[in-house]
Image (spheres, rainbow, N blue to C red):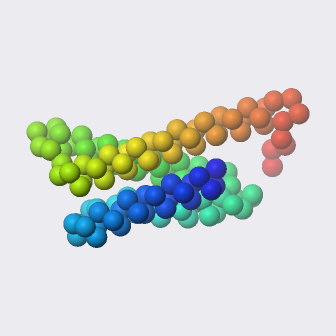
Amino acid sequence: MASTTIVFGILLILLGVIPYLMARQPTAIIPAGVGLLLLVCGLIARNDRLRKHAMHAAVVFGLLGFLAAVGRLGMVFARGGRPTPLSGTSLGLMALLTGVFVVMCVRSFIAARRARNAPGGFPVS
């Protein structure tokens, strides 16, 4: 899951940098901040001793990124407005990427717990 976290981090960094370069809007860089946090967590998770903590931190950052993107889209629509095509696409992709990442992490956590609790499962360290 560490490699997956790194890939999602890189995708979110690109999702922040590319729209920022296109529009020069400071808020466009927000997905890159979430991506950087995921990238760092993914790199830390390569260490076996730190993997569990790093992946739990990564899923929290992913969830916060999802809530931020969906919340921002919700605020725009609640005011009766429409996001610009660039911001709408960026927020939608951020919500999609972070949402998929969180679901993948939760499924991985469940599988790890089942494997640990199964007869002859891997030892808890």
User: Residue 25, how many percent across, how many down?
Assistant: 22, 66
User: Residue 32, how many percent across, how many down?
Assistant: 40, 63
User: Residue 79, how many percent across, how many down?
Assistant: 12, 41
Point 16% across, 38% down: residue? 78
Point 17% across, 52% down: residue? 84
Point 58% across, 43% down: residue? 105
Q: Nearer the viewer, residue 20 or 125?
A: 20
Quarter of image, res 16: bottom left
Point 18% across, 48% down: residue? 83
**Can residue 26 be spotted in the picture?**
no
Count of marks, rendered view: 0
Image height check: is 118 above or below 101?
above
Q: Nearer the viewer, residue 21 or 119?
A: 21
Direction from residue 2 to residue 114 in the image, left or right: right
**Can residue 123 be spotted in the picture?**
yes
Image height check: is 43 above or below 86?
below
Q: Residue at the top extreme?
A: 119
Direction from residue 23 to residue 42 in the image, left or right: right
